[in-house]
Amino acid sequence: MDQTAESVVTPCSACGKLNRILRARLRDDPVCGHCKQKVFPRKPVAVTDATWKAQVEDSPIPVLVDFWASWCGPCRAVAPVLDAIAGERAGRLKIAKLNVDENPLSASRFGVQAIPTMILFRGPVEVDQIRGAVPKAAIEARLDRAI
């Protein structure tokens, strides 16, 4: 059995050290071998055009990307909901936030014309898209259907 095909290498969200994790153990919310913290983040992480591939496309778990802007009232309203979901689904889902004013390439690549827009990715594949400031229950229902 080829162990490299059966595992993924991902950086720890706390210390940045690389960890090899068996694919079968990804949903077990693994602990970093170096710092002993959880490998996957407990809160939303900032993503930029430059870090897109590493943070979203190369993630071994699904990623919900929140396309937002600091001046957007509905974006600020949905932020606490995403914070809560990030904590509740830690280890099974990563929440990422991309500021569209500072990162126009990624926003235009996915045709984001209104914010907030939340796009769920599994690797480089877009799985679902949620537009507008929707209630937590609606976001969770969409996540449950898609994941």
Image: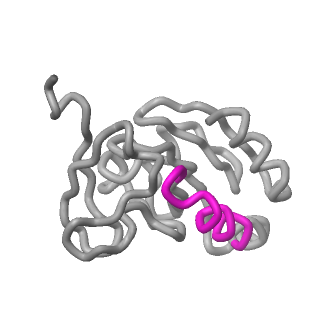
**Residue 113 picture location, percent across and down:** 66, 45
70 sits to left or right of 102: right
* Viewer can see residue 121: yes
137 sits to left or right of 16: right
Magenta region includes residue 54? no
Q: Closer to the camera, 119 or 21? A: 21
Tell me the colour scheme of the image.
Answer: one colour
Count of picture labels: 0
Magenta region includes residue 90? yes
Q: Residue furthest top?
A: 1
Q: Closer to the camera, 131 or 102? A: 131
The answer to whether 2 is drawn above or below residue 63 in the figure is: above
**Residue 75 picture location, percent across and down:** 71, 66
How would you classify the magenta stretch by its main secondary structure? Answer: helix
20 sits to left or right of 115: left
The answer to whether 38 is drawn above or below residue 24 in the figure is: below
Q: Residue furthest front?
A: 1
Q: Residue at x 66, y 33 (%)?
A: 146
63 sits to left or right of 32: right
Q: Residue at x 30, y 55 (%)?
A: 50
Q: Residue at x 38, y 44 (%)?
A: 25
Q: Quadrant of the C terminus?
A: top right
Q: Which region is colored magenta? A: 80-93
Q: Closer to the camera, 22 or 81? A: 22
The answer to whether 106 is drawn above or below residue 125 in the figure is: below
Q: Quadrant of the N terminus?
A: top left
Q: Closer to the camera, 20 or 137? A: 20
**Residue 103 picture location, percent across and down:** 44, 58
* Viewer can see residue 100: no
Q: Residue at x 78, y 66 (%)?
A: 74
**Residue 45 picture location, percent across and down:** 46, 66
- Residue 31, by quadrant, is bottom left
